[in-house]
Image (cartoon, coloured by chain):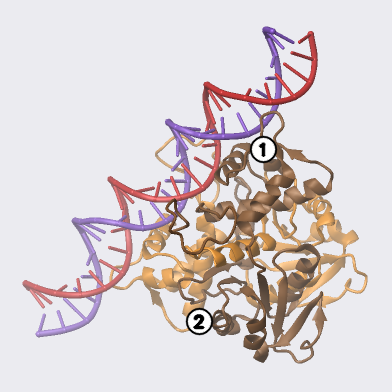
Chain colours: A orange, B brown, C red, D purple
Amino acid sequence: MTGSATSSSAVEPVRTAAPIEIPVRMVERLSAYRRQLRRWVAEGRTRIYSHELGALVGGTPAQVRRDLMTIGYTGSPARGYEATGLIERISQLLDAPTRQGVALVGVGYLGRAILNYFSKTHPDLPILAAFDVAPEKIGRVLDGCRCYAMTELEAVLGTQPVTVGIVAVPVEAAQGVADRLIQAGVRGLLNFTPTRLRVPPEVYVEDVDIAVSLEKVAFFARHGAGSDEE
Amino acid sequence: MTGSATSSSAVEPVRTAAPIEIPVRMVERLSAYRRQLRRWVAEGRTRIYSHELGALVGGTPAQVRRDLMTIGYTGSPARGYEATGLIERISQLLDAPTRQGVALVGVGYLGRAILNYFSKTHPDLPILAAFDVAPEKIGRVLDGCRCYAMTELEAVLGTQPVTVGIVAVPVEAAQGVADRLIQAGVRGLLNFTPTRLRVPPEVYVEDVDIAVSLEKVAFFARHGAGSDEE
DNA sequence: TACCTTTCGTGAAGTCGTTCACAACGAAAG
DNA sequence: CTTTCGTTGTGAACGACTTCACGAAAGGTA
């Protein structure tokens, strides 16, 4: 629907080399595909079938093929898809053309967990700065990431290409933090607090609600498991 | 399947059993509704309109009404829904009739974050035990939760009504932990590692994948925010 | 070369959840 | 008592994603 033939679309920026309108769910799957593909390649495999990739991420072969078709990546019958090329194609879509980074606000246990996890694992999309109010954390370098005082937020973000903010602070502080991050140029927020952040419409917010997830698991642990998923 | 109209139902738990088949998404919303309703009541309000509740969780009024209709809770025009009654109705559906608890495996930063968060906030669905391999953590009580050695897992779970397990260990250990939890009677898993756990079909697995969430945010931060949600 | 097997690419059909739109209703005001 | 306003309950329309099903193509094999 975007880009071509059919009319409909009103707002049509159509700038760079990504003319595709990718649905939310597919972005999740593409991200998952890529990570599994990297493992696959790291194990020395070079080609992969739709059913293999499907199994790795918990999807069906048909879904994998449909997704890859949508992003315009073509495999070959009897040889499947070429893994490294596919990784590259996905990266082309998901990654920013210019270096883009993340700011973490709140270096409590959750913040530390995130830092620790991402420092090892994430080449693209690095966490460029962390912020906290606790004086003993300020100035330290945790998992390769410098921790600044909250008061320095605007200054630091002025010098770094940060477009995403992680809100890992107590719930009372969340809205204030969000406001400051957005004011400083952040366009996407990953929110771990159980509040609905009020943001301007151009800012994307993703809520990660562990309490809800846990209750969901508890519920389906009791009733039929149905189909597991994410 | 679920206690049908015929009188022959074998195990009919208690009063007003739930003959409803609730879709996954709705469980998430109900959980969110309940939390917001508790805040609402804590602020002294007693009644709530669909559009108010919708705003609190980021949904539409129509969706809220549809959900409440589905769970069979009736409001009144011009007065809205009665908050405490609604909380009770949701709890009736989401909570186990008998005491049910959670086991946490992996007391790293992430595990600590979860403990810390839930100790304050969660009356129902308590974390009954934590497990780790690190000797210095064993025996300690963190946020009101006792930390045991991994070797004690089966023994401890034998004495506690644990039906849900949280997997917050390094990825290499995840499958082994899952196997042991399931063997010990757990029927639902909250998995924070980036692997697809292999489990028997009656076990429900919920994957929380922070890396994927972050990449999603980064993507939509760049492209149109579309509609934020979750 | 001819055949056989397996997988891809994709139009079409199906499924499921969300949103629309409106009648019925209760409360409050005139 | 009657009118007006705003909200609920809900059938029906809508839309989006998922799955199905099948023709075509590419290796492998004799």
The percent position of residue A213, horizontal first and vertical second, equals 63, 62
> Left or right: B111 with respect to A89?
right
Q: Which of A199 and C13 is in front in this view?
A: C13
**How busy is the neighbourhood of tag 2: few (under 14 within 10 Å), some, or many (20 plus)?**
few
Circle 1 SS class: helix
The percent position of residue B156, horizontal first and vertical second, equals 67, 85
Q: Residue at x 56, y 66 (%)?
A: A222
| Residue sticking out furthest to the right | A135
Q: Residue A55 carries which label?
A: none
Q: Is residue B61 above or below residue B158?
A: above
Q: What residue type is labelled 1?
A: Ser
Question: Label 2, on which residue?
Answer: A42
Q: What residue type is labelled 2?
A: Ala
Q: Distance between the residues labelled 1 and 2?
A: 51 Å
Q: In which quarter of the image is the N terminus of chain A?
A: top left
Question: Label 1, on which residue?
Answer: B50
Q: Is residue B115 visible to us here?
A: yes
Q: In this view, does B141 lie above or below A195?
A: below
Q: Is residue B61 above or below residue C14?
A: above
